[in-house]
Image (cartoon, rainbow, N blue to C red):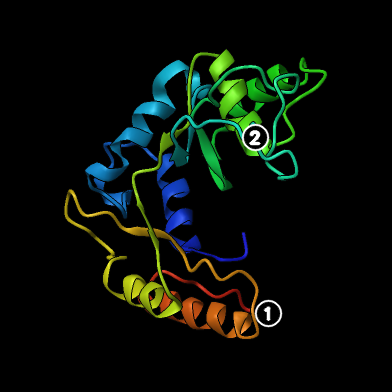
Amino acid sequence: EDDLFVNVLLLHEIIRELKTDPDDVYNRYLYNSQIDSLFLARSANNGKQFLFGLAYQAGKPERNLTHSPYFVSREEYAPDLYPGYCSGFGYLMTSATKSVLLAEAVKDQQPLRFADIFITGIVPQRLNFFCQLIPFGFYQGSVDTCAGLIKNTTMLNPPPGIASLLTCSTGRHVGQHAFADYYRLWTELKLMYAGRINPVKEQ
């Protein structure tokens, strides 16, 4: 998605911590209650039902606007509602979850053409689990709003109940100043995480 600014440094910390012992507070940079649901999901069912992202609730397929790219006939998908699923901008899953989803997905000879709904909604539903909301903030606004939120909301050690900013959407898609916008927000992230970034020296 070209209108989303993702805090990749925070995402890296989330993934790194999921590889540590949850009781090892000295190695938990994000040590707070926000990440506990991720640890619980990682340990349950051998990590085979670990699927997190921007979770969408069940919604109705487009049945009326036949010229819409989102039109879906009953032949393509018969139920009245899609299952809940993860937004297509990205998902967080374990390799074990990926394996079980792939094994189930290849059984379908005519999968729904919307990959996010099919892979993170329909297939998990068959396996009796669903996409869960990743416990970090999602916001939408202007580039200025996103820059301000990155400065003020993405705290290094947020208190319980305060969500660190993971994704901010401007809704602009590609524009004349898109590169400048990305560079500006990346600069804000680098300033915030200056003590955590270790540049690789050229040999």
Bin the neighbour count of mark 1 within 10 Å (Cα to Cα): few under 14, some 14-19, many 20 and up.
Answer: few
Q: From the image, which quarter does the C terminus lie in?
A: bottom right
The residue lying at 43 percent from left, 29 percent from top is 42
Residue on which the image places disc 1: 202
Residue at point 60% right, 74% down?
200
The circle drawn on residue 64 is 2
Q: Is residue 46 above or below residue 176?
A: above
For mark 2, does the 10 Å Cα neighbourhood hold few (<14), some (14 to 19), or many (20 or more) residues? few
Q: Which of the 4 quarters of the picture holds residue 93?
A: top right
Q: Is residue 17 left or right of residue 174?
A: left
Whole-percent x, y for residue 195 in the image: 37, 74
Looking at the image, which residue is at 41% across and 20% down? 44
In the displayed structure image, the side of residue 35 where residue 108 appears, left or right? right
**Image location of residue 69, percent across then percent down:** 72, 45
Q: Is residue 24 left or right of residue 190?
A: left
Q: Viewer-nearest of labels 2 and 1? A: 2
Q: Position of residue 130 (x, y in %)?
A: 48, 25
On screen, residue 181 above or below 150: below
Residue 25 in the image: state x and y as whole percent.
Answer: 25, 46
- Name the amino acid type tagged 2: Asn
Mark 2 secondary-structure assignment: loop
For image coordinates 56% across by 66% down, the residue present is 3
Q: Nearer the viewer, residue 23 or 92?
A: 92
Using the rendered image of the protein, determine whether residue 193 is visible from the camera's viewpoint: no
Q: Sequence order check: which comes first, mark 2 or mark 1?
A: 2
